[in-house]
Amino acid sequence: YRVQGKGTFVTDKSITFSITAKLSFSSEIIGLTKDIQTVLNFSKNQIASPHIARLLDIEEGDEVTTIQRIRLVDGTSTALMTSYIPQKLVPGLIDTLVPEASLYKTIKDRYGLEVLSATETLKTVNANEYEAKLLNITERDAVFLVERISKSTSGRVLELANTVLRGDISKFYLALGE
């Protein structure tokens, strides 16, 4: 941007995610001046693939509720989030899903299931054609893939979430102790 009499300045358009934050997208974003929006791309019940069933600790052939959302930060498509939840834990969730509402809060309020902990794996990959289109980037651009497995207070796997974050605007913050 330019300031009359001062010159041209480069703004930092990156979005910082905290790796040590709470279990919600908006709380992971560092900086309170960001406008966060959610667009529901699709939601459906489907048969879990063997890979999804293994990660959710359910039987092959069990149904999962799949929810895909696009997260925008300051109007920019930033993340493509796909959640897989054992359908028998959340019957009817699709019918009452509100895109702007917290998925975890909805599950807690409607089904009494609360997320206690999660593990995440972060790796870099190249965006495929589908991801690139939804994130407004070029196919094969570098993206971060975050795989999260969330467990309920009873220790049961509640959700598998795969989040694709744009590599050109995402950075991560990690606070380490002694």
Image (tube, rainbow, N blue to C red):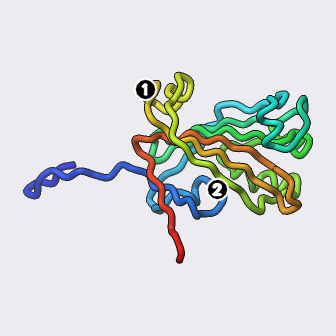
Q: Where is residue 54 in the image (x, y as percent from the top left)?
A: 82, 39
Q: Is residue 79 visible?
A: no
In the rendered structure, the answer to whether residue 21 lies left or right of residue 111 reads left
Please, which residue is most extreme toward the top here? Answer: 129
Disc 1 residue crowd, few under 14, some 14–19, many 20+, Cα 10 Å: some
Q: Where is residue 129 in the image (x, y as percent from the top left)?
A: 52, 22
Q: Which residue is drawn at 56% across and 58% down?
A: 28
> What residue is shown with label 2?
24
Q: Quadrant of residue 38?
A: top right
In the rendered structure, the answer to whether residue 8 lies left or right of residue 151 reads left
Depth check: 20 or 111 in front?
Answer: 20
Q: Is mark 1 on a helix, strand or loop?
A: loop
Q: Can residue 31 be seen in this view?
A: yes
Q: Position of residue 15 (x, y in %)?
A: 44, 51
> What residue is shown with label 1?
138
The type of residue carrying mark 2 is Ser
Q: Relative to 78, does residue 5 appear above or below in the rendering? A: below
In the rendered structure, the answer to whether residue 155 lies left or right of residue 14 reads right
Q: What element carries label 2?
A: loop
The type of residue carrying mark 1 is Thr
Q: In which quarter of the image is residue 137?
A: top left
Q: Position of residue 24 (x, y in %)?
A: 64, 56
Q: Which residue is drawn at 53% across and 50% down?
A: 36
Disc 2 residue crowd, few under 14, some 14–19, many 20+, Cα 10 Å: few
Q: Which residue is drawn at 36% across and 49% down?
A: 13
